[in-house]
Amino acid sequence: MDTMTATKIVGGVCGSLLIFLLVKWGAEVIYHPGGHGETEAAYVIEVEETATEVASEGGASDGEAAEAAAGPTFEELYAAADLASGEKVFKKCKACHKLEDGANATGPFLYGVVDRGVASVDFGFSEALSAIGGNWTPEQLNAFLKRPKDFAPGTKMSFAGLKSESDRANIIAYLATFGG
């Protein structure tokens, strides 16, 4: 083997190693924003506490909790619901539910769901939801949509829920316009 061929081989190996190290360094910069071995989180999720939660933990006086809890009730929000906003919120549901009568998808159809019996249509409901019984009143739907897993532990519905009570009131009012 002559000197020129050996030089090309060594240069190719060194160049490949250099490219590998540069890619490794770039990946570490992108995928390890907190650095190595540090205990500090790369990002912080802030959670707003409501006045009733603070009061129940002993952090607020009864007057402050009563003032914060004096916001509109679900019934007031439902009575003043905005159907256009409900239609926008329903876009989160469209992936699994349809509004056409009898047209099940991943989830049961929602045509006429307001005041309909819980688990009363032809669909493979979980035992947890079938055991609830009663009707889907606006109040029941509100409790369910807040966090389905808490309302019916063991439900097959994987939706995390709607945090905003006004969003829940709007979507329930929107659903009530279909087949009620």
Image (spheres, rainbow, N blue to C red):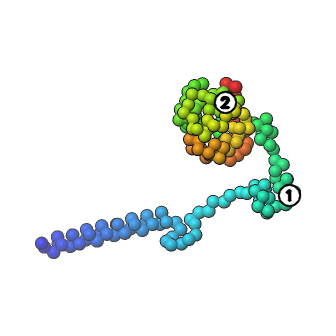
Judged left or right of residue 54, residue 129 is left
User: Pointer 1: what residue?
Assistant: 62
Circle on res. 124:
none
Query: The C terminus lies in which quarter of the figure?
Result: top right
> Does the image show residue 157?
no
Q: Residue at x 81, y 50 (%)?
A: 69
Mark 1, secondary structure of its residue? helix
Circle on res. 117:
2
In this view, which residue lies farthest toward the right? 63
Where does the image place residue 4, in percent across and percent down from the top left?
17, 72
Where does the image place residue 177, in percent across and percent down from the top left?
70, 28
**Quarter-wise, where is residue 111 in the image?**
top right
Q: Is residue 19 above or below residue 64?
A: below
Q: What amino acid is labelled 1 in the image?
A: Asp
Q: What amino acid is labelled 2 in the image?
A: Gly
Q: Is residue 54 above or below residue 142?
A: below
Q: Nearer the viewer, residue 68 or 118?
A: 118
Q: Nearer the viewer, residue 76 or 127?
A: 127
